[in-house]
Amino acid sequence: MADMSAEDHADYLPVVRRPTLEDLKIALSKGWADFKAAPTFGLIVGGVYTFGGLLILYVVSALGYGFLGFPIMAGFALIGPYAAIALYEVSRLRERGERVSWEAMARDLTPGVMRECSYLGILLIFLLAIWLKSGAVVYAIFFGMHLLSLPAFMEALFSTSSGYGFLMLGHVIGAGFAILVFSLSVVSFPLMVDRGTDFITALITSIRTVKLNPRLMLGWGAFIGVMLLIGFLTVFIGLMIVLPILGHTSWHLYRRVVV
């Protein structure tokens, strides 16, 4: 059999609509409705995610690497789409008019679906590891190899030229990672959960979604970043509500964009 051409392969990719501001508004409205209708599931998923973040921060601080606190909080958002898999399933069950239960969610999240999602999850964790390594490198550039205590580091961060440089370069690098991860995951996980699509096809579809309306989609990404920042400023506690709402909204945005 002859090799499949790029044009032939494109026929197997999902059709992607150009996302609009109206799509985002409707998705947010439905996402909030899902959270209100099934808050227990959202709070449990958000709680596990929050506990994981707090545990990582505690371990890092105990080891004397408090300067990685900010990169960890920023980078932890990179694996948020994977953590929200159960939330996509809650939204799908409600969309089909079915009763939401852990049993129903386990039935639909088959081993095949979870395997493909795990492949992308591993990629996100790999990117998180690179991001944290980048944070250590940026620290060494501005503060050298000497590890400052957390109080000393916080004082230097906002009162010295090295601290300002650390913040500026760190934000630039972080923005690059955030845009990359957003482009890879904005609709990929919901697509895999919904159709059992392989993760390569899901990645391509997600990137195409961003390319069709980069301003709007990057604006949505910035909104996600602001909401997560609010969650982080409450020492992760706010994430128990922010993550479920964003997860449900991501599902409905996927449903309006990917045909």
Image (tube, rainbow, N blue to C red):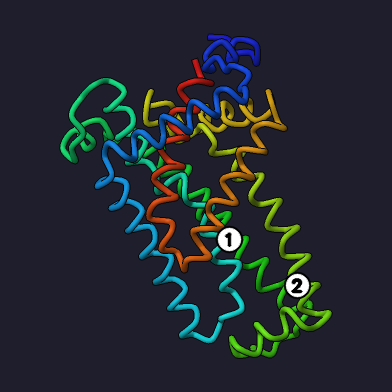
Q: Does 30 appear above or below 146?
A: above
Q: Does 239 appear above or below 34?
A: below
User: Mark number for residue 140?
Assistant: none
Q: Does 238 appear above or below 11?
A: below
Percent position (x, y) of residue 189?
45, 36
Please name the residue that numbered disc 2 is placed on.
166
Percent position (x, y) of residue 115?
36, 39
Count of numbered circles on the image? 2
Q: Which amino acid does label 1 sit on?
A: Ala
Q: Residues within 10 Å of mark 2 (few under 14, many from 20)?
A: many
Give the side of residue 240 with respect to residue 146, left or right.
Answer: left
Please name the residue that numbered disc 1 is placed on.
74
Q: Which amino acid does label 2 sit on?
A: Phe
Splitting the image into 4 quarters, where does residue 110 fall?
top left
Percent position (x, y) of residue 34?
34, 34
Residue closer to the observer: 196 or 163: 163
Residue at the extreme right:
161
Give the side of residue 86 with respect to residue 141, left or right.
Answer: left
Q: Does 190 appear above or below 46?
A: above
Splitting the image into 4 quarters, where does residue 19 fall?
top right
Residue beneath the point at 68% across and 23% down: 212
Percent position (x, y) of residue 258?
51, 20
Residue closer to the observer: 199 or 38: 38
Residue beneath the point at 48% across and 33% down: 28
Give the CA distance from mark 2 to mark 1: 14 Å
- Dot placed on the residue nearer the N-terminal end, 2 or 1: 1
